Amino acid sequence: MAKRWVGLVGVAPLLLGMMVAVPQIVVAPLVLAQSSQSSQETEARRLYNEGERLRRQGTRESFQQAIEKYQQALSLLRA
């Protein structure tokens, strides 16, 4: 029984280390994905706002530029 206890005591730090390390392995890509997604959403919002600014100018050229900005924003949001 004592031998079994000593064996478990020797393995416990290894198991604890694995329990602590695994979430870091899983969480890191999720954080990067969220960060990337957040930056894409921020860029899409910026493009949309730029499109709105151009649309409010009311000229033919600004309407065409606004459509381009909206399309760029839509592409980012779909990605």
Image: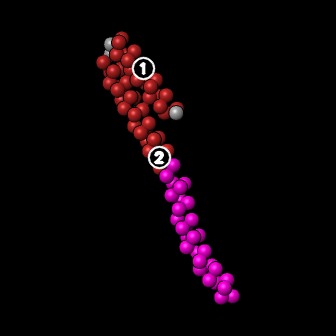
Identity of the amino acid at label 1? Glu
Location of residue 2 with respect to 75 vertically, above or below: below
Q: Please state the horizontal and vertical placement of residue 36, each as a whole percent of the image.
A: 45, 41
Q: Which residue is at 54% across, 67% downward?
A: 17
Q: Which mark is residue 13?
A: none
* Outermost residue, bottom side: 2
Please tell me whether mark 2 sits on a helix, a strand or a loop: helix
Tell me the quadrant of the picture where the N terminus can be found.
bottom right
Label 2: which residue? 32
Residue 19 magenta-highlighted = yes
Label 1: which residue? 68
Q: Which residue is at 38% across, 20% downward?
A: 66
Q: Which residue is at 53% across, 55% downward?
A: 25
Range shown magenta: 1-30
CA distance for labels 1 and 2: 29 Å
Indicate which disc, 1 or 2, sits on the residue closer to the N terminus: 2
Left or right of 1: which side holds 14? left
Tell me the crowding category of disc 1: few under 14, some 14 to 19, or many 20 or more residues within 10 angstroms, Cα based.
Answer: some
